Amino acid sequence: MSTYSVTRSTVIPAPAKDVFPLVNSFREWPKWSPWETVDPDMQRTYSGTEFGVGARYAWSGNRKAGAGNMEIVESQEPDVIRIRLEFTKPFAAVNPTTFTFVPEGGGTRVTWTMTGEHKGIGKVFALFMNMDKMVGGDFEKGLTSLASVVGSGKA
């Protein structure tokens, strides 16, 4: 069984208290998530708590968006958020995802990490696709967008 990890990080020129809430509530993700625009007709469902541990989000969209759900399983403001990310389409996978927020040079270093295992059809897929290359660019776009939202004051 092979495992993988995708990590991207950036310094956002704002305190963690201004950045953390945008990640800690899935209702805020449409403002910055790189996947929110993949399918304009994507169906979204929010459940559980509004933010923090127990907040849930499910989506179902076109082939590119796929389907799945996320749940915040740990939230320690302003340091870390851990998410259980589960894809159900195009293929099943569970990818633990972590956001960390560390003060750096008058701003906050935000690090986004997703880990996973190549199983079943995913093992075959992994022979041809590099997860870091496939998802890393999206993480970079998301972090840039997150910084833009914080900087615009529209948080």
Image (spheres, grey):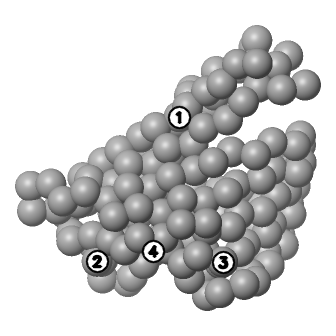
In the figure, residue 54 lies in which quadrant?
bottom right
How far apart are the alpha carbons under marks 1 and 4? 21 Å
How far apart are the alpha carbons under marks 2 and 3? 20 Å
How far apart are the alpha carbons under marks 1 and 2? 25 Å
- Judge left or right: residue 100 versus residue 3: left
How far apart are the alpha carbons under marks 3 and 1? 24 Å
Q: Amino acid at mark 2?
A: Lys
Q: Secondary structure at mark 3?
A: loop
Q: Amino acid at mark 4?
A: Leu
Query: In this orientation, which residue lies closer to the viewer: 61 or 3?
Result: 3
Q: Secondary structure at mark 1?
A: strand
- Judge left or right: residue 110 versus residue 39: left
Name the residue that disc number 3 marks. Answer: 54
Task: Let me know if residue 94 appears in the view.
Answer: yes
Name the residue that disc number 1 marks. Answer: 6
- Crowding around mark 1 (Cα neighbors within 10 Å: few <14, some 14 to 19, many 20+) is some
Name the residue that disc number 2 marks. Answer: 17
Label pair 2/3, CB-CB below 8 angstroms = no
Q: Position of residue 44 (x, y in %)?
A: 79, 75
Q: Position of residue 103 (x, y in %)?
A: 18, 59
